[in-house]
Image (tube, rainbow, N blue to C red):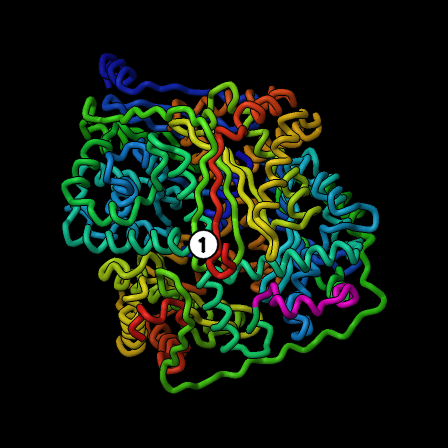
Amino acid sequence: MYKKITIMTLFMLSLALVLSMPFAAHALDFKKERLANGLTLIHVERHELPIVMATLLIKASPLQEDGTKAGTAYLTAKMLSEGTAKRKSADISEQIEFMGASLDTSVNDDYTTVSLAVLKKDVETGFDLFSDIVLHPAFSMEELTRRKTLLAGSLKKRQEEPSFIAGRELIKNLFGDFSYGRAVEGSIESIEKISRLDIINFYDANYRPDNAILVVVGDLGKDELAQLMTRFFSPWQAAKKQTVQQKPVQAKLTAYNQPRIEVIDKDVSQANIVMGRMGISRDNPDYYAVQVMNYIFGGGGFASRLMKTVRDEMGLTYSINSFFASTLYPGRFEIDVQTKNESADLVIKETLKQVRKMRTDGVTDGELADAKDYMIGSFLRRIETSKKIVDFMAAVEFYKLGGDYIERYREYISKVTKEDVSRMAKKYLSDEDLLIIVVGNKKKMKL
Amino acid sequence: MNKTGMVHAIRRILLILVLIIPSYAFAGVQEFMLENGLKVIFIEDHKIPIANFQIWYKVGGIDEPAGKSGISHFLEHMMFKGTPNYGSKVFSNMIQKKGGMDNAFTTMDYTMYFQKLPSSEIQLSIDLESDRMKNLLLNQADLDAERSVVMEERRMRYEDDPKNILREEVAAAAIKVQAYRKPVIGWMEEIAAITRADMAEHYGIYYSPDNAFIIISGDVNPAELMPVIRKKFGVIPPAGAKIKRLKTVEPPQRGERIVYRDSETAEVPSIVIAYHVPRFPDKDSNALDILSSILSGGKSSRLYKRLVYEKRIALSVNADYEGINRDPYLFSVEATAAPGKDIKDVEKELLDEIAAISAQPPTKEEVQKAKNQVESGFVFARDSSFAEALYTGMFEIIGGWKLRDLYLEGIRKVTPEEVSDVARRYLTRENRTTGYLVPKKAGK
């Protein structure tokens, strides 16, 4: 049952990703403060269930790592739970799993998170372990070697996935040496070069209380949390020796003047097609209009034009969708679709036709109203559970969306006009500089 | 309403109000029964103004006639293709316009449709679901287009996913008679052959109020919604004796079965070992659950520690037991070899660990850890009103949602000796089917 719940959570998360966005301002009471050591603390009390969720967001990602040693940020995060000054790797997992709790780390293009989910009755032990792995990781040589071998093996296995190969090729072409141009896990070659010292230096430079946000949601009162913080997080101080943070390099826009297709031969039954170009950063003023435009075009699930034409009418795919990865620096716009090898050509033609139609004809009043209604109406679902709230609040703080973001979201979406949407389509949906990567059976595809 | 009318109403709707369960497993549940056999279950949760509507049809892979594998799943797709009242995909568009989301999934045992909506909009679900329970169009042109979509889904999830294709082969080899031998999505050749008449018959038999139940969870008021549900669903006639149940019994396995699956795309070999086991609420079921957790529930579990951490011969390892089924199914253990490692060595380590736990009971701490994981899983599930409804429904499908209490009680009672005992009796050589995924690149 426990395992099924985990699978279910993943299932729901993936649904949220596909169809995320969304109702009236349902205010969320939170308290935000900056602790003496510089750590930003956000607290949301929810006493309905005896559970506590905490997410520590650290501003550490491939953005700060040495590109020749890609995967440093990822390995650093994964090494946290592989032993501390006083606990062995096996002791950490044993204690967490004995409580039926979870303590996980993840890394994306912009930041690292360490997340704890624990029953209220076990919150002290949970915070003890949580703070221990963040404050006192041992980074032992033996554990690092083991982790690197395991990671290299997983990366080799991922070569089986045509979508992984296609996605990797797309970002490499769009972003070049910039960190958004590579998988956060790095590559088999790059992780080989990462030494224990590299991990320690990356940790010392980036894992600092003044460079982190802690969000705690659940069955904890103000005083209870204050005591936990004093005991477990007040000893956290920045390392004395700090390495200089690397300046992220901006990606350059490539103009192809016509769609460029790259085919990678692989003996699979479906062609995996990804199309992409440069998109926008999260703080771009166009963000909300772009989201409305993309909902209509390819982001709105069964309501989107791509789904209606390529799946519903033509029956050529199970799934087609588009998104703007709106990151700290300008991210990518991407369309993903799979179809049997024989119809790859037809799917590409139809998708490009839809891109051009969006640019030349704009959208109807009905489409605009539907998109805005969905985005405003579904917003509440983003803060539906404690798990969702904890991650949502961390991202709101990281991307500086403002303490009144939940209240103002409706206004941001409401003011988007049909003209805005047309402008966004012309600005960001070019078919001329789209890069198209196709991983499929070359002999069967008519490309 | 006069007195006679009120008594009549009380008879018509059987109301069972269940008090909050002593443990923290689930909150209060209310259950109603319509005259036509449709059960309605409410799980109130007022944390946030969102509601979930789920309608569960007791039809899945297990109910499919020979040669028609995948028809239940295909029909699930067709349920989004419209009725005379609402055209194709209008359903989803209307839900999304209200800020909601909807989807559906099919398993071996059931087909479940769900919507998540602002709670003020939940009547929309009642309108739309009652409409498509009886008025589905099943246009030939829609059917043909959707068949291609289902085939693409099969290519994506199975044909091009080496691990899933191996699991499919192992189930088909391990199970000779019983319906769980077929994949829920169906064999490609059979998806191709399903006709509109087949589909209409399947829909006519299984999409009826007496073969379904509704679960509504979240910020809702049963007293407000029941009159609407009665009005919309109460008029749909029951299928009664039309509902067919295929009764198949799997003969005991008398020797190891081995299956190889070559793969053009696999980078590393994998192994799946499956054993026939009883289902919940058989007396051995809870111990099998604890056994799977001790073997692979997290990084501190036996198989992870032995194969991934200490010996470093596997990239991943998992033991899986799904006992909440309509018929008995399989206990499976699977692993993916680390690059350059021999799958035979991986197999030996898996079997050695199984032999060890069969010979010597696990420690009390290992058993307690597994129990704690089950209990906390139930508490964390309540964070999401969707998950809460889902677990309620899974037990309702196999006989009644109250079985979840029996399940938890059973888990609490499992002893280390019982864990060892079920391993010894079920995880045997003669009850085993072993499947190997053979990457073509590497040679066998």
Vertical comparison of B139 with A174: above or below: above
Chain label for disc 1:
A
Secondary structure under tag 1 reads helix
Which of the two residues, B236 or A405, is positioned nearer the viewer here? B236
The residue under the point 47% across, 43% down is B435
Quarter occupied by residue B389: top left
Quarter occupied by residue A33: bottom right
Q: Is residue A414 visible?
A: no
Vertical comparison of B179 with A241: above or below: above
The residue under the point 65% across, 74% down is A67
The residue under the point 24% across, 35% down is B66
Which of the two residues, A204 or B353, is positioned nearer the viewer here? B353
B167 falls in the magenta region = no
Q: Which residues are magenta?
A: A183-200
Viewed as shown, does residue B31 lie left or right of A246? left
Residue that label 1 marks: A379
Spot occupied by residue A222 in the image (x, y as percentages of width and height): 70, 43
The residue under the point 62% across, 61% down is A152
The quarter of the picture where the N terminus of chain B appears is top left
